[in-house]
Amino acid sequence: MSISKWLGATLGWSFGGPIGAILGFALGSVVDGLSNGGIKVNTQGPYGNTQQPRTQSGDFEVSLLILSAVVIKADGKSNQSELDFVRSQFVGMYGKERANHAFRLFKNISKQNNIPVRDVCLQIKQMMDHPSRLQLLHFLFGIAKADGNVSQSEVDIIYTISNYLGIRALDFESIKAMFYNSSDNAYKILEIDKSATNDEIKKAYRHMAKKYHPDKVIHLGEEHRKGAEEKFRQVQEAYDQLQKERGFN
């Protein structure tokens, strides 16, 4: 499959707005004569409407590529382990051929200076549902942790992205806790504090299990269930840990 056919089959709202402009620049670097191949990127026109459209797998993918590039450059360098993580995740989600197309785009997006993070995030916030935005955040922390350490500059940029995406601080801390080891991580993942009663823990678990259920992102395609299942598993493990520590059923 050519890169133009791949994009035409998987992208929806990403062809417009600031994301479309970034994508247009990257595509110009990837392949010559793309405008003659039937794919036209709208870099100027409006992308918003009064009804939130259904996010396609490709829209999620391009959003992920752009925000991943922002996070990787946050500490002033592109660590090879982080690049390898991005590539391996895309191979796992999309298969080798589609992942190769995506990674070629990613490398060209990464070359762009001054990516308008706020504008990109506001477009994503307007066009993408909340569960999918949470999935984006989870992936970004995975990239930051790929080299074994999440730097403060990476945390700061992910927090900024999270705010622009309209994600609550509690949700940010919940997903962040999935990538750290500390005594209160289980509580943070469930979005409660250590003073919570056993009944409150059970209630929080039910709430978080529902919020992070893989079916919430099923519209993105089966390829994104794996990442959603990882969040869901960590919620289950946090609950199991507190059950064991407190001795309740």
Image (cartoon, grey):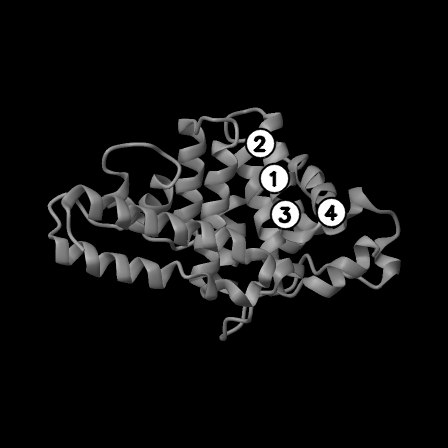
Amino acid type at circle 2 is Glu
Q: Amino acid at mark 3?
A: Gly
Residue 78 visible in the current orientation: no
Q: Which mark is residue 96?
A: 4
Nearer the observer: mark 2 or 4; the answer is 4
Residue located beneath label 2 in the image: 82
Q: Quadrant of the C terminus?
A: bottom left
* Residue at screen point 20% across, 61% down: 203
Q: CA distance from mark 2 to mark 1?
A: 6 Å
Name the residue furthest bottom.
51
**Mark 3 vs mark 2: which is more N-terminal?**
2
Mark 3 and mark 4 residues within 8 Å of each other at the beta carbon = no
Amino acid type shown at disc 1: Val
Mark 3 → mark 1, Cα distance in angstroms: 10 Å
Q: Which residue was labeled with disc 3?
A: 92
How much space separates mark 3 and mark 2, taking CA atoms? 15 Å
Q: Residue at x 88, y 52 (%)?
A: 33
Query: Marks 1 and 2: in contact by CB < 8 Å?
Result: yes
Tell which of 41 and 45 is nearer to you: 41
Percent position (x, y) of residue 85? 59, 36
Q: How many badges with numbers are in the image?
A: 4
Label drawn at residue 86: 1
What residue is shown at x 75% (from left), y 63% (from top)?
A: 8
Q: Secondary structure at mark 1?
A: helix
Image: 105 above or below 210: above
Of the two numbered discs 1 and 4 on the same chain, state the one appearing first in sequence. Answer: 1
Mark whose residue sits in front, 1 or 4:
4
Give the structural element (helix, strand or loop) at label 2.
helix
Disc 3 crowd rating (10 Å Cα; few below 14, some 14-19, many 20+) is: some
Give the Cα separation between the discs numbered 1 and 4. Answer: 13 Å
Q: Quadrant of the N terminus?
A: bottom right
